[in-house]
Amino acid sequence: MSELFEVVKQAFGEMEWAYEEVPGVEVVKLGFEAYHTKVELHAQVFAEQGVVSVVSQLPLLKRDERVMRVVAELLVRVNRDLTLGGFEMDWPHGQVLFRISNVFVAGAYQSDVIASMVHATVSETDRVTPFVDVVQRMNPGELLVLDVGTLLERKDLLPVVEGDEEDDD
């Protein structure tokens, strides 16, 4: 196993994250209970390039062209505002993925950067999941008139952050 893969496992150990190694490849799998969903992800090392890639998957989409087109638009709009990582759609399989990768200089591997990549993956996956769920529950007529920009402005689909609660007074 490569030094970079050892650093990935070390970073996960430091964070006390339980993970499972995939035999024969430099991949670890783990899951997190987030606000909206359980986020399953894997971290893969491409040692020759010095790359770590963290990938999560949202639950499988309805295999409906209309739903998939709207979700694709939603992902493009979300990606426009991301600074790290991005959402992808595996169209033939109806799968939404989030991927964040980093290229490390040989010998300058930083476990805190790796942990941050995992945090970003969990956070972004959990943040987008309810929006995708709303689209999947819509009937064809609702999908035709849906304004994706307005949907993404809905604050009720985001987790409450301590200190951000509004007073009801």
Image: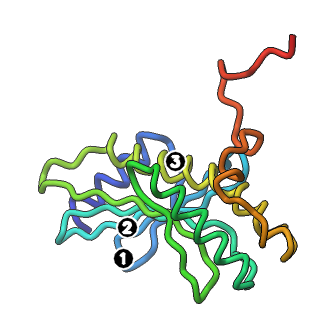
Distance CA(mark 1)–CA(mark 2): 8 Å
Figure quadrant of residue 48: bottom left
Question: In the image, what residue type sits under mark 3?
Answer: Trp
Front-most of residues 81 and 91: 81
Above or below, 3 against 123 in this view is below
* Residue at disc 2, secondary structure: strand
Location of the N terminus (image quadrant)? bottom left
Q: Is residue 88 above or below residue 124?
A: below
Q: Which residue is mark 1?
A: 25
Q: Identify the residue under disc 3.
A: 17
List x then y, in percent, for residue 44. Answer: 37, 67
Q: Residues within 10 Å of mark 3 (few under 14, many from 20)?
A: some
The colour style of the image is rainbow
Q: Residue placed at 53% from the left, 62% from the top?
A: 41
Numbered circle sitting on residue 44: 2
- The earlier-in-sequence mark between 2 and 3 is 3
Q: Residue 24 location, x and y as percent?
A: 37, 80
- Identify which amino acid the numbered label 1 is placed on: Val
Instruction: State how far apart marks 2 and 3 are (Cα).
Output: 16 Å
Q: Nearer the viewer, mark 1 or mark 2?
A: 2
Measure how far apart labels 3 and 1 are at the Cα level: 19 Å
Going 74% across and 84% down the picture, which residue do you hit? 64
Residue at 67% over, 22% down: 164
Residue 67 drawn at (x, y percent): 72, 76
